[in-house]
């Protein structure tokens, strides 16, 4: 093999290696981007789960208040009925 052929062979190998390195760098960047997107999705999901729990607690408090109001209303109606009978 002549020196020129050997040089061409080495240059081809270098070019191929550089393309591989470039591809690896692109893939690593894509992987970092996807990891970042996944972390953001997890944070968003966690935030939505917290909001959902807060809303469930709020609905529960509203139901308790409604039941309390209904009981109070029933008691007032009963007192009013008794007061009418007494007069």
Image (spheres, helix red, strand yellow):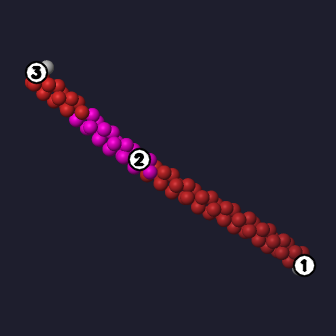
Q: How far apart are marks 3 and 2 (CA)?
A: 49 Å
Seen in the picture, residue 67 relative to 10 is either above or below; the reply is below
Label disc, if present, on residue 86 of the rendered structure: 1
Instruction: Report if residue 25 lies within the magenta region.
Output: yes
**Which residue is painted at 40% across and 49% down in the image?**
36
Q: What stretch is highlighted in magenta?
A: 18-39
Q: Nearer the viewer, mark 3 or mark 2?
A: 3
**Which residue is painted at 67% across and 61% down in the image?**
60
Seen in the picture, residue 22 relative to 40 is either above or below; the reply is above
User: Relative to 51, is 10 on the left or the right?
Assistant: left
Instruction: Report if residue 75 lies within the magenta region.
Output: no
Q: Where is residue 54 in the image (x, y as percent from the top left)?
A: 59, 61
Q: Where is residue 34 in the image (x, y as percent from the top left)?
A: 39, 44
Q: Position of residue 43 (x, y in %)?
A: 47, 54
Question: Disc 2 marks which residue?
Answer: 35
Question: Disc 3 marks which residue?
Answer: 2
Quarter of the image with the N terminus is: top left
Q: Does the residue at mark 1 contact the one at mark 3 (Cβ under 8 Å)? A: no
Mark 1, residues whose alpha carbon is within 10 Å: few (<14), some, or many (≥20)?
few
């Amino acid at each position: 093999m002549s020196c020129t052929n050997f040089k061409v062979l080495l240059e081809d190998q270098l070019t191929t290696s550089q393309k591989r390195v470039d591809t690896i760098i692109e893939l690593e960047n894509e992987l970092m981007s996807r990891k970042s997107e996944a972390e953001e999705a997890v944070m968003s999901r966690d935030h939505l789960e917290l909001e959902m729990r807060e809303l469930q607690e709020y609905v529960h408090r509203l139901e308790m208040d409604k039941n309390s109001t209904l009981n109070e209303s029933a008691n007032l109606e009963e007192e009013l009925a008794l007061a009418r009978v007494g007069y």
